[in-house]
Every structure is written in C-alpha cells, then in structure tokens.
Image (tube, coloured by chain):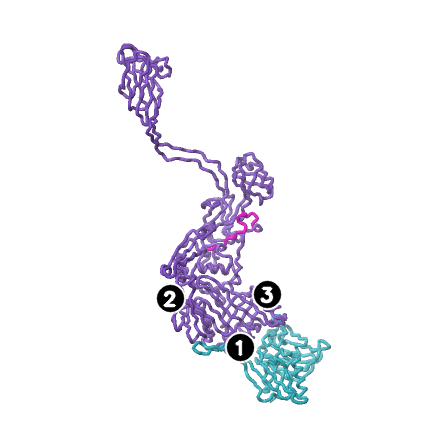
Amino acid sequence: MVRTLDANQTRKIDRNYIQPIYLVHLSLSGLTLYFSDRTLYYNAHNYEDYLFDLSEIGNDIRNLGGYDNCQLTLRFKNDKIHDKATLIELFDDYPPEKKYIEIYKLCIDTDETFVADVSTKVFKGMMGQPYDIYDPASEFKIDCSSMLFGKNNSLPLDVIDLADYASADPDDVGKYRNIVYGSVDKLVCPWTVAGWLSTLTADITAAATSIVVTDSNGCPATPFHAYIDSEKVAVTNNVTATGTLTVTRAHDATTAVIHNKGASIYEELTTFEVEVAQHPVKAINDIYIKRGSSEWLRVIAGWTKNISIGGRSTIVFSDKIKFDEKANLALTSEPHTHTTSSYSMKTCIPTGATGGYAADRANAIDGNDETFATYDDSHDLSINFTETSLGTLNKQYIYIRGYVWGGSNTEVWVNGASRGNFALAAYGEQRFVYTGGAWSDSIVLKSDTDVGVSNAYEVWKVIEYTPDIGSQSVTMAGNSVANTVIGDIVAADVDGYEDDVGGTYTGTGSALIERPDHVRKHILIALLGFVAADIGASFATVGATYAAQIVGGYKFAFNLPEVATEAMDLFAKIDLQSRSNMFESGGTFNLAFGSVAAPTSQMTFDKDNVRGSFLFGKTEVADIRNKLRGHYYRDYSKSGSLGDRYMKVLELSNAASITKYGNMIEDLEFSCVGDLALMVDDVMDWILIESKELKKTVSFEAFWDAMILEFCDYFTVTSNFWSGEKFKAIRLVERPGSQLIEVQGLQFVAS
Amino acid sequence: MANIKLLYRNILENSTVNPTNESSVFPKYRAYDRDIGKLFKASTGASSNFMITIDQGASASNTIYPCNRLIIPTGHNLSTIGCILQYSSDNFVADINSATSWTATAAGINKTFGPYTQRYWRLNICGSTTFFPEIPEMFLGQDYTFQANPAYGSAVGEVFNVARAETQSGKVRLAQLGEIRKSFSYNFQVLATTQKEDLETCVAHTKGAKPVWMIDDAGTLSYVEILNDSLDFPRRAYGYYSCVINFREVL
C-alpha cells in the first residue's frame, strides 16, 4: 500500500519543484528536542537550527525473509544549548544513545503558514553514540538505526540459574526459560524446584548405613531426608570427595530393604516444580514424562497446573515422578507339538488287582516273586493299570510269571479279547504281545478247566509307544524386585500467550495469540517495548489474509528461544515462515504478504520521472531453488539434525526448473509452525515460485514524487526493453540533499 | 541616500543581563548569542511588566559603551505589546529615562535613539501575567556609519540554495533546500585612516566570526557575515586606503 500524504503535501510532491524541510524530534529521557536545519515554528514546536544535514534515509528488504538496518546519519551543530556551552555537553546529561528519533518531512511554499500538521513522518529509529566530535566545537555526528535494530538484543530471554532457582535441576541450569506462542505440543519444561538427586553406585543391603552415590555435590547440608526407592532415610553426613553418605534407615514407617545399584536417591521436598513458561499462559493441557530416550508417558495425577503464578506458569508435583523399573519374568510360550520316529518303552506297574481270590490276589502285583495269587475257571484274576498316555501306543508286551495247574490252560485277555494262552507246567515266565489297545488296559487271566487253581506270582506289562510331547506351556512366574527411578524430562501441551481481556493483540479478549500478525504485534509491544502507534494498519490487512489463506488460517506454535535469540533474526524467520515481509516505513512497522496474484502497479517510471538510466540485472543463479524440504512440528526433547528435531517433513519441487538448472535443494526449517501441514505447504509453494527461476532486477534514481512508495509496493518500468514489467520495491533510499530517491525493484513473476 | 551602517557590538554580550525570569530550555543567553534561530523565552509566572535589565558596569574595568540602536528581529511574540527601552545611571532606583517606546507589530524591531552612554539599560515589556515574551535576539549598541558609500559597480545580489537535476528526458526538477540569502560585495575606494581604524576595531570585535547587522544605503536591515578571509586595506594615498568587504546574509 502506498504511503498516504496529506493533500497539501501531495500537491507539492506532484510539482517539478519542491521546498522540503526535515523536522527532527529527539526523545531523550525527560527532554524532547526539536531540531531542524533552520529555525521554524511549526505545529506548536520551536524547531531550532542544530542540524547541518541528514544523510540518506532508507533501507532495503530481502525478498525471502531478512531484516536489514537502515542508513541514516545526522550531523549536528555543536552549539550552545540550554545551560550548556555545547550540545554534546547536554547529551552528557541527556544521553541520546538508544533513544528514539523521529524525522518528519514538510514540503512548503514560500511564506506559507499551516493551521494544522501536514508533515509526513519518514523515519523513526534509535540513535547511536556521537562520533567525529570536533574541537573547537563545531559539529559531531550520530548514526541512527532502524527501530528493530535498536532492539536487536532486547528480547527478554532469561535462563534457569541457581541464583533465582536454588533447587533447579543442574541439568536445566543455563537453559532458556520458555516463551510460548500458539498451541505447542510436548513442550519440555525445565525443573525449577527439583532438589538434589543422585544414584547408588552399588547394591546396598537393608542394614547398610554407609552408601556411595554417583555425585553428592549439590547435596543439601546434613542432616536432611531423602528417599531411596520408597524407603525414607536420614542423611547425617556427606563426604563429597567420595560421594559417601551416612544414613539412618527406614524413617517415617518406611521399611529398610535392599536397593540395587543405580537406584535413585533424592532429596525430600514438599513440592517439586517445572516451569512451563516465564510468563502466564492460556492453558496447560496434557502433561508427559520420560526418562532419557524413552517414549513419553502421560501423567494422569499428582500435579497442580498454574497458568499464572508470580508472572509465570508452572506445574507443581507433590512428589518426584517415579517409575518402577523391573523385569517382568512372566513368560508364556505358544502351544507346539514335537514328534519323533523312535519308539519308547514304558514298563507299567499294576496299580490294583481284582477277581481271583481275595486272600491272595494282591500277591500278583506286590513285586515279590515268592508269593502268588490264585485263580481258577470260576475265579478270573484281573490285573489293573492306571497309566497316563505318553504317546501313541503301539504294542503291549504282557508278562506273566506263574504256574498253571496241570492239564489246564490259562487264557490271557486284554481289551476284551483273548490275546493268547499258556500252560506252564512249572514255575516260569510267559510273554504275550498285543498290538494296540489302551494304556490302561487290564490283563485278565482266565483258567479254562476246573482241575485246580493256577498261580500268578507277578503280572506286568511293557508298552511300546511313540512319544507324544503334544502341546506344552512354559511359564516363568515372578517379577524382579523393582528399582524406583525418577522421570527426568517433563513436557506439557501448552497454549501460550493469551491476549488480555480487551483483545489488544488479537481483537478478541483472552484469545490465544497464534496468528502470525498477532504474534508479531505481541513480540513488538509486550516483549520489545514498542507501542501500538508503532504498528501500521497493514498488520490487520495481512492478518485477514493469514486467516483466509488456508483452512483454519495460518497459525504459529513455537517456543521463542528455540527459534532465535535476536530480534532481527527472529523476525526474519517469522517472515519466511509466513511468506511475508515486515519492514519499517514512515516510522511504523508494516507487513506485506507474498501474494502470487497479479499485483497493482502503484507508479510507472519512465524517462520523464527518472534521473539517469535504468540499470537492469538478474538475480543470481546460485540463489535458484527448485527442490525444497520443509521440516516442521518440533520435537522439543531432541536435538541434532533437522530430521531429529522435527517430527514431520514436506517436500516440494519444480520439474521444469530442475530440468533447466539441475537439482537446487534447500532444507527449510519451520521452527515457528506446529503440526500444520497446510500452512507449510502453502508457504513452500510461494518460496518455490519466488526462487525457481531467475528474476529481473532494476535500480534507478527517482525524484521526490516516489516518496509515496513503500516496500513491497509494485511499480512499472517503461524502458527500451523489458518494458512494462512490474517490479516489487525492495530498496528505497531518500537523499535529502538532492531530493532524489534510490529505487531498486525485483521482478514479479506469476505462479 | 544614507551611508551604510554596521552594528557590530551588542552591549549585552559584555554586560550582566537579568530578565525577570527565563525558561531553562530557552535561557537568556539566547537573546544575545548572535543566532536568530534560537529563541529566548520567559518562563511561566511572569509579572505584568517583563524586564530585561542590562548592567554594563558590573566590573570597574568594564567599558560603558554608548547605544543608539535596538534591533529585535522577526520571530518575537511582542506583536501588539507596548515596549519601552529605558536607561538609568542608578539601576532604575530614581533615575529612569525612556530612550524610545513603541507598540510592537509582528515585524522586526529596529529602533534608533540617542546615542546615550549609560551603565544601565532595560527593555520594559508591558504585557500581562499570562504573556510570556519570546525574543530571538536583542541587539543593543551603537552603529558605525561609513564615511562614504561604496563605489558604483559594487555587486548586490542573492545566493540560491537549490539542487537542480534533470530527468532522463531533460525535464528540470528543482529542490529548494534553503532560503535565498542576500550577498553584498562593497568596494570602498577611499577610506580615511580613522575609518580604517574603526573597521579594524570592528574586525577585532567580531574576529570574522560574528555576524553583524548592516543597514544598507537604502536603509534595509540585513544580518550578515563578513565573507572575507582577511580584511586588507591597500594604501591609495597618504592617510587613505581602499577596502573590499563581502557580506552574505545569515539566516
């Protein structure tokens, strides 16, 4: 958007002559000086002649993110002022360094008087130190910087230190405190109250009173209480050189037990605290814990969330967050079958006898060959077995050791049928073979004639079988003794800065500050100390584009110290990651969105309004990019390469450009963007369009009518070749001494 | 046609100057710092008559210079205000005399009187308790009149402060960076020894660094600097010299 001038001033810059006056306001501490290169009473101020001249006023921007300082030097007359013999002495009492300077341009006609202020603010910045101070007192110079450059090192970054957080985790000392914008997932929160923590260097018994820890430096003064696993001990002495602690065991109804090497020992505190951010936040959502490189575990109880306490936000735990570290020995194998081609033999000892004669039937199974059971044709003797199957039964070998009454036969029945007979006339052993049957088959001896009783001294059988292991389960029961270990990394899903109830930054009271223009505005005002008047209306215009550019709109989610530690670097990254340019123009911060739609040309330059020649060029081929990888969604618990630090990646390329120039690859780090692929894709689309081809450049000197141009405005050049091209203004430098404006443009290329 | 005059000595510079009050930001020295651009302002709480009192004789060694002209250039706020320039021998206890009085307009003030050789002078500004005077410069002294005007052919002109540039097509663009300043190149072909000595006294006072007031032969008042690197007096005859003095207006 072009700069809007008062009608009075517009009329004057449209003429071929001009009478400019530059009015300078120096805002010192407790004193405002109004200077010019002449004496002038204007707009209720006496502007006094303390300026020889101004150097050029202007700046450059970089197309794909970047923020350059301005160029402006003031040459002061070192005259008497106030009660001081020289201006430089007044500056001893009212130092100009880091103080604001505003410059207004007023175009006048001779003897013209003004009833209202019609001047145009052309610059606001910060003064540096005086230099080139001549003696005898005549003059000195002061360079001025752009507003943001002046605050480049003013981001309110703070670190966890022991002076402020005496019980901080030593691992977190020196880390930046969080500054959070948008909805950040699993933001790592440093321990601000952690107490002393160490581990055992060796197993200890339940009776041990001298223990050695890995490090007892930082240990509280003895005596103090500590926990080892779940046992509370009193530490009564500490030898830091060896890490040896003297303890009394089993305090407060805890039990003295053995503890393993590596078990944590930690100082007893009433509360433990992590800091979510160094400022109040809108919400603290889920909380997670992990140890080392393990996976995050969600904490479901034991915390108090403080979204605003003492100007910051914290999570307070009632105890250390502990894990039981133990091996679970329960092991169950899946059922499986083993087979074999070899037979096995099982001697089966009878478990009972029936029939025969009750008085002696047991003698057949008592294992004593001296005694016998008797049977005859009316008294069958049954020898019984209760065998458990060990496999597939093949054969049963029946063994009878006995005597058959003369003239008779004994039939041997197995499984309901006779399997043979025998007629031992004297004491002897008989074997039968029966293929098949069952493991528990009984052996029944039947006498065929009633001539007398036969005797059975011992009966048994041997089974030939194929072993069948069948389905087997192996169970190892019983867990190990647990070691208590301490979770050392806490993270939380956090909604960062919240707008005030008046909606100063977002227009909506108490809204989450996440839209890129709102984030910029908050950083500028709340963190860097600028005022609302320093921010131009273009913020709102571009903000509306952010909201509509993708479904749900552009949203940032980041922890500021992880992105940048200097203001200009921060805004350069914010610009690139939101396809925008923030710049200073007319003393305010302004914003332009990187549109790929055909722009409106605000001015046409030709031979009638340009001094000298157009100087054309092209962007550098080394700056071509045609294959982009965008890494986004930060994992705040990890460091290392982009692939480690970011959980997601998006790739875009342009085939035509690759064909033309070969692969020109760049990895882009979207450190301000959370899990929002749509936004990353949209921004990368634009970067690819802007960088896939060479672009024409032009530079020239224009006259004062070009002062309406602002950065990122488009203008048209009418020339002998490349005529009619539209260019984006990326350098605008006004030279007060000649009223010429140096213009540099970058060609617009349609998508 | 009157002869050219120079007013180069301002008695305020070597006197004790006491205004009724003064602003700390716009203190009294600004009324006699030979810089028209820097205002002296009264502070709030003035009485109805605001006085600027000048005492030439604070020290016994001080010279009491005669005065015949008061100049207060444009930029003051005394318009419609009655003013009296007074002198006294007893610091205005019993001896109070009016050198001149007038009701001011927005124009510059250029008053002649006397001359009077008096130790005490004061500018009595008859305003109200809500009126706070602002004076860019108060020049009080005796002007020096050349015995003869410069020879014909002396150049009088104006110096422009314009940056000129042309467009590629040749159209002229002019940036007026400052006001036009008058320039004077006066050739005094015959100067008597006394006048030469007077001019040397003038130069000894200004040392080529202090602007002075010049009233040209048409009676026009200009605040000028002497551009000469040195003031040379070629001898024309016994007891007679010539001199070329170049003046340029100071804004």
The percent position of residue A690, horizontal first and vertical second, equals: 40, 62
Residue type indicated by callout 2: Ala
Q: Would you place residue A262 above or below residue A589 in this image? A: above
Magenta range: A164-181
| Tag 1 secondary structure | loop
The CA distance from mark 1 to mark 2 is: 43 Å
Quadrant assignment, res B42 = bottom right
Can the viewer see residue A46 in this picture?
Answer: no
Residue B178's label in the rendered image is: 1
The percent position of residue A477, horizontal first and vertical second, equals: 43, 33
Q: Is residue A291 left or right of residue A89?
A: left
Residue situated in front as seen by the camera: A408 or A217: A408
The percent position of residue A307, horizontal first and vertical second, equals: 49, 51
Residue carrying label 3: A95
Same-chain status of marks 1 and 2: no
Quadrant assignment, res B239 = bottom right
Residue type indicated by callout 3: Pro
| Main secondary-structure element of the magenta-colored stretch | loop
Specify the chain shown as purple. Answer: A
Q: Colour of chain B?
A: cyan
Quarter of the picture containing the N terminus of chain A is: bottom left
Residue type indicated by callout 1: Gly
Residue situated in front as seen by the camera: A524 or B48: A524
- Residue A169 on the magenta segment: yes
Residue carrying label 2: A598
